Image: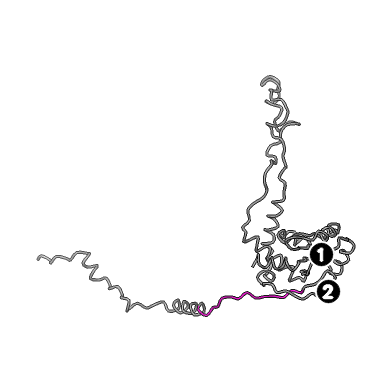
Amino acid sequence: MRQPPQPPLRMLHQQTRQPRPTSQHRTPHQPKIQLLKHLLKHLLMLKPRRNSKMKLNVKTLDNKAAGDITVDDTVFAVAPRADLLARVVKWQLAKRRAGSHKVKSRSEVARTTAKMFRQKGTGRARHGAASVVQFRGGGVVHGPVVRDHGHALPKKVRRAGLRSALSSKASEGKLIVLDKLVSKGKTAALRAQLSKLGAENALIIGGEELDAGFVNAASNIPLVDVLPQQGINVYDILRRDVLILSKDAAAHLEERLK
């Protein structure tokens, strides 16, 4: 007896395949949606952060009170980061290197390039010029050459390093703000004034222009450096125990780094 024809496999697959669920039948991932709603709610509640201020006492050179100033926390009260300070100091010291180190190579020494003796028959090793590196008076192989040791460092890292250095001095109580940096040019008098302030080892940052008498008096005091406000740097801040800023320098740094 002849059997009825079987349907194609494709038709059997279509008959047995389950229908795809529509959007009405799909069950959403409830935990993920709840988390997104929670995050969105908190983001909508967030308000822009206002820059907070901190007060710094202002003194005179005679260690007398002269009021106070208000500065930005984002400049003088950030959490110091040792990694940024190390990167900036390494960058500064690399830029200061002269890079003038140089030795003469085989092609630069003043020795003959004639063959020292015949190739065969002497029992000695084969040699050519006397300027090769294995002979005394010969050149140096892989020696130092004149080059620049400086490397690039992003401006954001430099600014962050300067903020860390200022904040570290402020947190240690080693930041002094003076109203004026004016002196009659007498080294002994200025040394006595700095001793009253507890700043025998100090970096002094003045305004855009420094008083000539103050600079002359401070130049003869050991462990005391004087720089204008545009010359402040991380290395000089860290190498001195106390940091002294004029009111103009503090305002300039706040505007520059905030």
Q: Give the camera-side residue of 252 and 24.
A: 252
Query: Which residue sits at x=71%, y=66%?
Result: 166
Q: Give the camera-side residue of 16 and 246.
A: 246
**Quarter occupied by the C terminus:** bottom right
Give the secondary structure at mark 1.
loop
**In the picture provided, is 177 more to the left or to the right than 29?**
right
**Mark number for residue 182?**
1
x and y percentages locating residue 85 in the rendered image:
69, 61
- Other residues around mark 2 within 10 Å, as few (<14) / some (14–19) / many (≥20): few
Q: Which residues are magenta?
A: 44-57
Query: Which residue sits at x=44%, y=77%?
Result: 33
Magenta stretch: includes residue 168: no
x and y percentages locating residue 58 in the rendered image:
77, 73
Give the secondary structure at mark 2.
loop
Q: Give the camera-side residue of 219 and 10.
A: 219
Q: Amino acid at mark 1?
A: Val
- Other residues around mark 1 within 10 Å, as few (<14) / some (14–19) / many (≥20): some
